[in-house]
Amino acid sequence: MNNRLAPERSAVLAALDRIKDPETGEGLNAAGRVHGLTIRPDGRVSFTIDAPSALIDRYTEVRDAAEAAVRSVKGAAAATVVLTAHGGRSDARTVAPPSPQERRAEGVEGVGRVIAVASAKGGVGKSTVAVNLACAFAKLGFRTGLLDADVYGPSVPTLLGAVHSKPQQARGRKLEPVEAWGLRTMSIGYLVDPERAMMWRGPMATSAIRQMLDDVNWAPLDVLVLDLPPGTGDAHLSLLQRLPLDGAIIVSTPQELALADVRRGIALFEKTAAPLVGVIENMAWFDGPDGKRVHIFGEGGARRTAERHGAPFLGEIPLDPVLRESCDVGAPFVAENPEHPLAQTFIAMARTALANAEGGHKPAPSIRFE
Ligand code: ADP
């Protein structure tokens, strides 16, 4: 039996006010950063810290400090703090983001933001980009999850070198995600023989994805990255209408044929409620051993298509053997080489995508990898 007395709300807020807000220098609660504070009878405390998106990196430390401060309050058994971001300070004061509990009805319990990575066709590097973006979010200090929603071709276990991992489940509890490279991950590839999943009909695939969202113990996460199945057809439309996305990213290669696909992707996200937060051009060029840069699939097509449709462009990723090798050995490039310029490109893209998801999806400054 639990005889614990839940902590006083005022004691929790006072503890939070002893932490300085990096922007204003006030206490965290006094600065208007704390939202959706919930104190359960068993002493579990949860809330959201709403940070200005331009300073989001500095708030990951604040989040950790806030959790520690709340845990030390008399009666507190556990603290769950999710970081979200907003365009500016005035927003933070007036627009309270939903707390993890409030999001439960439509979103994923205890998850701050759900960002999907999509492509019209297979083989453009969507999963490679999704895995490396997830690692980039983790490098930025966000507690990050990765859900392989590509149930017909799950590649996340291979890309993470976790093909033999099995998610654990205590009786009556949710499934535990597989921890890999600092990410909490789930894939149908951990659960069933992928060949069996390939025979599933559309509704079964949709319900498998829904279950991996709802019946997995994701919380607490700041960001959950979804690696969507390739395609932009009706099956996707119905899938996306049921998924709670905060932002979608389209991955494309630069050639003309692929650009028609980008347009289809943009149209798909326009039809659903998912805000498009970025287009990424993958395999944009190849730097040969002689130092010459070759634009194998043409130049700048995805950027132009995005701009023409008013979609934010996040930047280009070159065709680089180091990326393919890291996929083959199951060691994500960004996790292993965070200081490398290519990893820094992914990290900059992750930061901009999140800022776009928070800030009304304004066109983002694009990043060029030199
Ligand atoms: P998709 O998810 O779109 O089907 P994958 O991410 O599985 O595509 O990538 C397909 C293949 O291309 C993989 O072998 C991967 O290692 C490779 N690849 C993807 N992006 C790049 C890149 N920028 N440079 C080199 N190889 C890449």
Image (cartoon, rainbow, N blue to C red):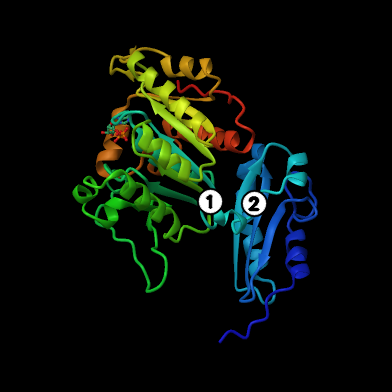
**Looking at the picture, does residue 226 appear above or below residue 19?**
above
- Give how far across and how far down residue 304 sits, in percent: 48, 14
Helix, strand or loop for disc 2: loop
Residue shown at 40% from the left, 73% from the top: 172
Give the residue type that dot 1 points to.
Answer: Gly
**Looking at the picture, does residue 288 appear above or below residue 108?**
above
From the viewer's perspective, is 88 left or right of 113? right
Give the residue type that dot 2 points to.
Answer: Pro
Q: Which mark is residue 317?
A: none
Q: Mark 2 points at which residue?
A: 98
Q: How far apart are marks 1 and 2 (CA)?
A: 10 Å
The C terminus lies in which quarter of the figure? top left
Is disc 1's CB within 8 Å of ligand 1?
no
Helix, strand or loop for disc 1: loop
Q: Residue 107 carries which label?
A: 1
Q: Which of 203 and 282 is in front in this view?
A: 203
Q: Which of 134 and 229 is in front in this view?
A: 229
Q: Quadrant of ligand 1?
A: top left
Would you say the residues marked 1 and 2 are in contact, meaning their CB atoms lie under 8 Å apart?
yes
- Give how far across and how far down residue 5 sits, in percent: 68, 81
- Give how far across and how far down residue 149 sits, in percent: 36, 45
Residue shown at 54% from the left, 25% from the top: 312
Residue shown at 37% from the left, 34% from the top: 234
Residue 17 visible, this orientation: yes
Is disc 2's CB within 8 Å of ligand 1?
no
- Give how far across and how far down residue 160 sits, in percent: 32, 47
From the viewer's perspective, is 211 left or right of 144? left
Residue 162 visible, this orientation: no
Count residues near mark 1 (Cα–Cα under 10 Å), then give few for <14, some for 14-19, many for 20+: many
The N terminus lies in which quarter of the figure? bottom right
